[in-house]
Image (cartoon, rainbow, N blue to C red):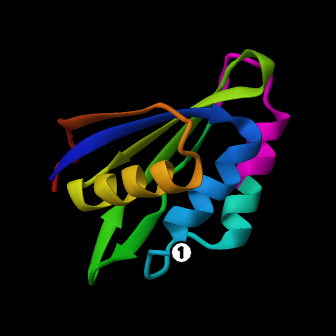
Amino acid sequence: MRLDRVFVTLQSREVRGLVLAVATHLDGGLSSSEVDEFCEALDALAPDDDVLIEPIVGYRGEALPLVIDAFKEEAGRCEVGFLVPRALAELVQQQAERVCPAAPVRVLSGGVDAGE
């Protein structure tokens, strides 16, 4: 399975909203309490550190990997990277544009082989 990478640069306070927006479209695998724990871990980080979550989620009848890696920069900025199959990459991009329209979004298609 080839995975795409979606990068969103935003304020750390916006990360929860983005991840929850993605999670509401999933059929399990990422609960709001897991999102809260992820965001609490992000808030506790020093700049130039990251936090990672790697659930298997349900989407459109399939179990798919969802890797979210949030890197904390200076001044409350974060770069959040999603490593996901194409269908989830499109969902992440749509939700990023909806939830935080001013945030830059970059998509790198098919760059990682997840193996099977």
Residue 89 against residue 10 in the figure, above or below? below
- At horizontal 50% and vertical 56% (from top left) the residue drawn is 98
| Percent x, y of residue 83 | 36, 44
| Percent x, y of residue 40 | 81, 48
- At horizontal 41% and vertical 54% (from top left) the residue drawn is 92
Circle 1: residue type:
Thr
Range drawn in magenta: 38-50
Q: Is residue 41 left or right of residue 73?
A: right
| Percent x, y of residue 71 | 61, 28
Q: Is residue 86 left or right of residue 82?
A: left
* Front residue of 107 and 50: 107
* Front residue of 21 and 54: 21
Q: Is residue 105 left or right of residue 30?
A: left
- Residue under label 1, please give it: 24
Q: Is residue 47 left or right of residue 92?
A: right
Q: Any magenta on residue 71? A: no
Residue 17 against residue 67 in the figure, above or below? below
Position of the C terminus, as image quadrant, is bottom left
| Percent x, y of residue 110 | 16, 39
Residue 24 against residue 82 in the figure, above or below? below
Q: Any magenta on residue 43? A: yes
